Image (cartoon, rainbow, N blue to C red):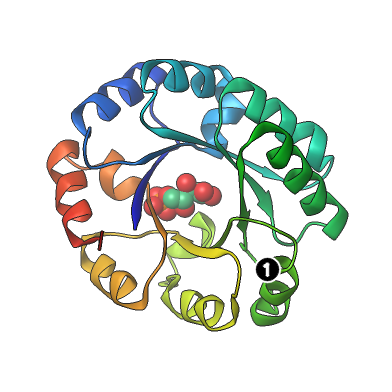
Amino acid sequence: MKLQVALDTLSLEECIQLLEQTKGSVEIAEVGTPFIIEEGMVPVKEIHKRFPKVEVLADAKIMDAGEFEADKCFEAGASIVTVLGVSHDETIQGVVRSAKNHNGKVMVDMINVHDLATRTKEIDEMGVDYICVHTAFDVQQSGQDPLEELKIVNKVINHAKSAVAGGVKLETIQDIVNEGAEIIVVGGAICNAKNRAKMAKEMKGYLKS
Ligand SMILES: O=C(CO)[C@H](O)[C@H](O)COP(=O)(O)O
């Protein structure tokens, strides 16, 4: 199991500090969608350069022009790129092609996929590396969390590994670990913690090796 920290709203300088402080706890640094909107590929390049042992995930949430957009992310130094599960198959296949050409990996974000079991089965045959259930930030306030969706994905996948995102916190991580996921994504719970290093270490402590 790997801990992925989602860097969504901090400055690049703050992210670099966070990654220094959380060394040993965090395996994957996600350059979040808001961060990409703010700064483009600059944080991907910079984090890749400064933290060669940390995998960089570009959360581009690709929806079209899959191969072209994924190429840009991998060329900047990302080792994992996200594409949306609601995209056309051709888009996901384009991202998979790009990943193969760059020796990278593909995470499919299943945010707002309505028939999760059916779409997961289809995507699982496309050669992607991770299928990530994701409770959108915009619906987390209504009490939704990704555990039930994770159970559905875990039941039907045969090739890809599962990942989970969306409001994961100290109080919910144990249930997720018990259910099983290769990657657990944590954003706000670490980035907004008073002591980020302590929080990341504590969360990492729950993960199975
Ligand atoms: O992709 C995202 C939002 O679309 C976030 O990076 C992801 O949900 C993790 O952040 P948090 O733990 O704060 O929900």
Q: Nearer the viewer, residue 20 or 51?
A: 51
Residue 146 in view of the camera: yes
- Quadrant in which the C terminus is drawn: bottom left
Residue drawn 80% across the image and 38% down it:
67
Q: Quadrant of residue 66?
A: top right
Q: Is mark 1 within 8 Å of ligand 1?
A: no
Vertical placement of 144 versus 45: above or below? below
Vertical placement of 115 versus 17: above or below? below
| Residue linked to disc 1 | 124
Q: Nearer the viewer, residue 152 or 199?
A: 152
Q: Quadrant of residue 94?
A: top right
Residue 85 in picture, x, y percent from top left = 70, 61
Residue 68 in picture, x, y percent from top left = 81, 32
Residue drawn 50% across the image and 77% down it:
154
| Position of residue 30 in the picture relative to residue 71 (left or right) | left
- Quadrant in which the N terminus is drawn: bottom left
| Position of residue 22 in the picture relative to residue 116 (left or right) | left
Q: Quadrant of residue 126?
A: bottom right
Residue drawn 27% across the image and 44% down it:
190
Residue 148 in picture, x, y percent from top left = 46, 80
Residue 134 in view of the camera: no
Residue 45 in picture, x, y percent from top left = 53, 18
Vertical placement of 179 versus 26: above or below? below
